[in-house]
Amino acid sequence: MVLQLMFTQHKLKEIMIVNENTIELTVALPLYNSREITWLAMESLVRQENIDFKWELLVAEEVASNPFGKEAIYSYEKKLREVGCIRIQYIPIETWIPLSTKWRMLGRFMSITSKVFVLQAADCYSFPRRLYETYWLALMENADWINSPNGLFYDINLDKTILYDQSTIEYPTGLNMALRASFARKLPYGEVARGVDSWLYRSCEALKDKELKVCWNGKESWKKGLDTNGLNNISMTRSYHFESPKPPFIETDMKVEDSIPKDIMERLRKAGEENKINVDKVRNAFA
């Protein structure tokens, strides 16, 4: 299995002892075919605020499928260190593996003192206080699982925004998810490509052997964050949510320009324009 080929127990031990006496939180970023959008996640991480603890960034990526790449990740190292990130680990993967296997892999590369395992998506601009609020919610509330109940979604190609509203459904997982680090270290093997959030939640519940303590971040910090659609491998097929929103997605008057920095918005719009040009070229080639 690829997971077994990627690292030995000896190598894993060497990785885990780096700065293990100080790291309190882990940001896990799985990538696949995300070269054009991973910058969004990275920009949000280097703009985190109020960080008063040390954290690490773990990235796992298939190197043969339009990768963002190790060099691009490490180009953010200086800025990441300025906001408390003292360890970056890039894990190259030779062939495709399911997302569930990636989460399991990332959990095993985590520093042994980390208490919180934050799930970061390539196409998500995490709100500036996400790490701070997640860390303190986890510690103060002794939470097993942390979510945000709301969030803006922006379709890069349609230039349209909708709102995710957890109150419209009954479901234990939401946005900006994080879980107890001890669970992430023990995730079971499973080749799950769809419904991975549910798989993660059920796996954590099984590890605890009883209902998880779920904490919802009730602050309105989520308004300064953004999930995008159109350039990540998964989100390329989700435009129907924007064309005809159904719960948990609803129409909204909120403007994405009010949520994220101007330079990020300009870059997103430019990416949308370039993507349309590329799509048109492909269509014309097959016309």
Image: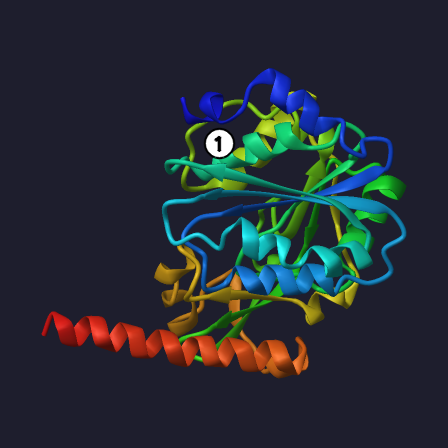
Judge whether residue 73 can be spotted in this image: yes
Which quadrant would residue 40 be assigned to in this image? bottom right
Please state the horizontal and vertical placement of residue 90, each as a whole percent of the image: 58, 42
Q: State the quadrant of the N terminus.
A: top left
Image quarter in which the C terminus is found: bottom left
- Rendered residue at 41%/42% (across/down): 194
* Residue 210 in sight from this viewpoint: no
6 or 249: which is nearer to us? 6
Q: Determine whether 154 is above or below 212 in the image.
A: below
Coloration mode: rainbow
Residue type (three-letter) at the residue carrying disc 1: Thr
Q: Is residue 120 left or right of residue 131?
A: left
Along the line of sight, the residue nearer the viewer: 191 or 73:
73
Determine the residue positioned at 76% across, 66% down.
Answer: 221
State the residue at coordinates (77%, 53%). Answer: 131
Q: Is residue 2 above or below residue 259?
A: above
Position of residue 147 relative to residue 116, above or below, is below
In the picture as drawn, the residue positioned furthest to the top comes out as 9
Q: Is residue 163 left or right of residue 117?
A: left
The picture quadrant where one finds residue 107 is top right
What x and y, as percent, mark residue 191? 41, 29
For mark 1, what is the residue? 101
Q: Check disc 1 and report its element: helix, strand or loop.
A: helix
